[in-house]
Image: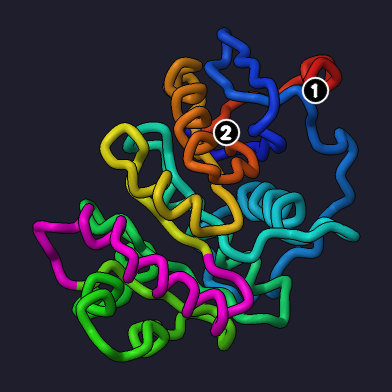
Amino acid sequence: MSRNFELLQNAGKDQEVFEAQSVFVANEAPETVIETPVLPEPSVPLNIGAKELEEVSKLVQRLFLVPGSASPRSVVFTGTESGNGCTWMCARTAEVLAGQVSGTVCVVDANLRSPGMHEIFGVSNRQGLSDSLRSMERVSAFAGQLSRPNLYLVSAGSATDNWQALVSSERMRLRLAELSSEFDYVLIDCAAMSVSTDAVVLGSAADGVVLVLKANTSRRESARKAVHELQTAKARVLGAVLNQRTFPIPEAIYKKL
């Protein structure tokens, strides 16, 4: 199955879902004609094909690089349920973003329940976020440089039984504030909303949340419930990403959004 996706923005407004596609959309869509984005340099070790790279670049452009707008700098990525490809999406978005900006980009694996970001990047997970929450050192001391000089990762760190308490703690909010002050962009991977409230907690401390949905799997009820929970917590819903889409979204549908 190909891994295509689309950013469906302004998900915080009156939501509708096309039942045939199990897609969560909004009543306002991005411009239907998108300029071809500037792709990152070939030296970036992205483990994705050309089409996927183009799609991730569009997502980066729409989310972080919109001209004349106050683009978000700290963003939480979460799925409505596990297995939606949220970690993959967060990692690839960070890589492409780092290739298109001169500022620093830090990926944070806040999925302490089931971490996977270190595996995607092929690095160690000996020390990371969980360790920083029990340490007096600055959280940036736990950030390791990745494929680019401006790309960093704070992995999940040592396994812990009280992962949910750590993520929802006030110290976690302070750590996020530290990261936002030391890096230009902070992308946070969270556990799915079906298994944890972490995204709700962290989303209210970040500039916004991106929901990752899986084509033909994510349900309308789950998406609406997730958005309601985020909005109740005063978290800004930036949009939704339809992942593993095997067909294009017709222009006629875009005109109805």
Observer-nearest residue: 196 or 216?
196
**Where residue 221 appears, x then y in whole percent?**
45, 16
Place residue 218 in its image quadrant. Answer: top left
Do residues under tags 2 and 1 come within 8 Å of each other at their CB atoms? no
How far across and how far down the image is residue 44, in percent? 59, 74
- Report which residue position mark 2 lands on: 242
Vertical arrangement, residue 231 with respect to residue 20, above or below? below
Mark 1 sits on what residue? 254
Quadrant where the C terminus is found in the figure = top right
Q: Residue 131 placed where, x, y %? A: 22, 77
The residue segment tinted magenta is 158-186
**First in sequence: mark 2 vs mark 1:** 2
Please name the amino acid that badge 1 sits on. Answer: Tyr
Q: Secondary structure at mark 2?
A: strand
Magenta includes 184? Answer: yes
Q: Is residue 18 left or right of residue 91?
A: right
Say whether residue 152 is left or right of residue 250: left
Displayed quadrant of residue 46: bottom right
Q: Which is more toward the observer, 18 or 129?
A: 129
Residue drawn 70% across and 52% down?
A: 63
| Circle 1 residues within 10 Å: few <14, some 14–19, many ≥20 | some
Q: Residue furthest left?
A: 161
Q: What's the amino acid at mark 2?
A: Leu
